[in-house]
Every structure is written in structure tokens, then in C-alpha cells.
Image: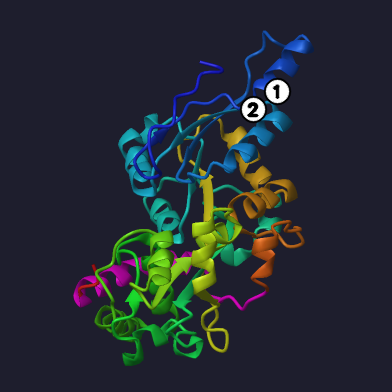
Amino acid sequence: MAGARWARTGKAGRGLLIWSALAVSAAAGLAATGQAGAQQAELNLYSARHYQTDEALYRNFSEQTGIRINRIELGDEPLLQRLKSEGANSPADVVLLVDAARLWRAQIDGLFQPIDSKILNERIPARLRANDGSWFGFSTRARVIVYDKARVKPQEVDTYEKLADPVNKGRVCTRSGSHPYMLSLLGAMVERSGEAAAEQWARGMVANMARPPRGGDTDQIRAVASGECGVALTNSYYWVRLMRSSDPKDQAVVDKVGFIWPNQASSGTHVNVSGGGVARHAPHRASAIRFLEYLSSAQAQAYFADGNNEWPVVKGVEVGNPALKSLGAYRAEDVPISSIGKGQIAAQRILDRVGYR
């Protein structure tokens, strides 16, 4: 029902269900011009993005187009399972996911329908989209290294490979090996260096752990600041979020922790995407394509940067986020995002063999 909204029911990943009319102002405009009796265009969005800052992104689209957004938010895996169980009866028009591993999984499971959009093909770099037009990356995030400035030398941890060296024994903290962020990182290593080298790295990581893998990326940063860990991996936007925080406790964390762009003298820093595509059985295909094209607009790209500390994928978009800009330029790896997703199968086999929980 237009205007209805379900309340937020919990933290990300536990299942946030929203049926939201974000185009109230647009609907009012239609009524004012004598079109109130016409059926309003709509879009059913299934999203694994759970960032409050995206509200402005969706609202702006509705205000520009008059298309109402009905939204369901779940974690990546529950969202994919829901799409599979709904099958041809799924009302989903657009599916947004937050990792190359999940985008690839949705692609091979046939949950997207390929589209040929001149706008998207021109704006989204080829390495940040599927080669069959089934999904597109709309923002990027880097997998970076943070370390305890009081007891770890930056030159000891300035590459992913060094984290597995004996010098870092008892220092390393990460989240679960089965998490998509880790699967994508290892998948990129498989693609770049081969399965044997990737397995050797994973064994070294297990040998160097300060504690069993647990928690999210912010937990890893805080564990470094507390002295529990000497070095950890995190996605860049978690670090920038702490940098932008006005909480004195967060600022204390930032003061104690060093930040590194890994592998700048070799393969480059691992980069992942948040992206999406048109659902296979989309009942509102035209609205779905229009929404994806909107996500590639300069205005939407700026929302990703300023709202959630992610980098735009479209060249020439001005970033107004001082904290994000302060990280400076870096060399990114050139492994295609689609290859990273494909490499997750080998990555999971490796993690299972070496006991990376």
C-alpha cells in the first residue's frame, strides 16, 4: 500500500524487510497535475545494501522519475535464497549485492537477465561488469591493511603476502574465511598467482593468527587498536567511517592504527564492488533498467562516495568526501571482477584444506 513502511527490525544480515513508498513527493506532484488517477510506475528492489545513507539515493530517484520503490533488504545469502525459492513468481525487478562473489553466484544461478544498455556500457568500465551484461558494479571498495603503530613496522605488513610471513606470527586477525570478502580476496590471488601460491598464503595466515577468525571489519580495526591483534584486513569504507566519526572512542582507535594500501610495488590493492542487475523475472523491466542507469549518473555516484565512503566507478565524478579523499590515489589490481567471483570455488576449497575457519 502506498505510503506504508515496515519498521526496522534489526541489524544488517538479520533481515530488514521494507515495503516503502519513497516517491511521496513525486506522487503528490502527479496529483497536482491531474494525474492522480493514473497508476504510478513502481520498482521492486531486492537489496543486500543495508546503509542508511542509501535512503537519499532511492528518494532522489523517485523524485526524479515518479517511480515508487518497494524495497526488501536482506543479507546477500538470504536474498539469493529468497530469489531461488520464489522462482518465476518473484516480484523482484532489481537485485543489489555487495561483493563480486555474490554477483557471480547470482549470475551463474540464472537470477539476472542480461541487458544491453548503451548508458551502462559507456559509463561502467568493462572490468567492473559482467561480460554478458547481467550485472554492473556501481561503487568500489578496497581490501586494505591496518596495523598497530606502536608495535608493528609498516614495511612488515605492506603486502598481503607478508601477512603470512613468520615475522607476523601471532599478530594477524581477520573475519571468517568463508565470508565473501575473504573469498573474493583469495579468489583474486588464485586468478593472479595460481592455486598453489594462494594455498601457501592461506596456510601462513592460519599459522600467524592472533585468535580464531571472528567479527566484522570494524571489529578487526578495534582489535588492532586494543592490542589484541597486530595487523588486520578491512574494507576501506569501514576505516573511513571511523575517520569521519565524532565519537572520541572512534578517534582514539584511528590515532592508534596505521593504514596501508597493500601491494603498491607489485600487483596492486584488491578491489571489490557493490553492484546489481535486472532480476530474471522482473515484472517492471523498463523501470529496472532506468534505475540501474540512474545508479551510474554523476549524482548517484556522488551519493556512494559521500554517503557510504565508497569510490565511484564512473570517471570524472567529483568526490566531496574529505576523509575518503585524504586516503589519496592508489594502484588497484587489474584482475577482472568477474574472474574474482569465479575464483571463489577454488578459494573455498583452499580454505577448507588449510582449516581457515
Judged left or right of residue 40, residue 252 is left
Identify which residue, 289 or 244, lies in the foreground.
244
> x, y (%) of residue 91?
44, 30
Q: Is residue 31 above or below residue 263?
A: above
Q: Which mark is residue 266?
A: none
Q: Which residues are magenta?
A: 329-354
Q: Residue at x 28, y 77 (%)?
A: 209
> x, y (%) of residue 141?
55, 63
Indicate the secondary structure of the residue bearing disc 2: loop
Specify whether residue 270 is in view.
Answer: no
> x, y (%) of residue 216?
38, 58
Judged left or right of residue 250, residue 189 is left
Q: Residue at x 34, y 38 (%)?
A: 82
Q: Is residue 101 above or below residue 17?
A: below
Residue highlighted by disc 1 = 26
Asked if labels 1 and 2 touch by Cβ distance under 8 angstroms, the answer is yes
Identify which residue, 84 or 5, lies in the foreground.
5
The way the protein has been coloured in the rendering is rainbow
How many numbered badges does the structure rendering display?
2
Indicate the secondary structure of the residue bearing disc 1: helix
Local packing at callout 1 (Cα closer than 10 Å; few below 14, some 14-19, many 20+) is: many
Identify which residue, 5 or 37, lies in the foreground.
5
Q: Which mark is residue 67?
A: 2
Mark 2 belongs to which amino acid? Ile
Q: Residue at x 35, y 67 (%)?
A: 344
Mark 1 belongs to which amino acid? Ala
* Lower position in the chain sequence, tag 2 or tag 1: 1
Main SS, magenta residues: helix
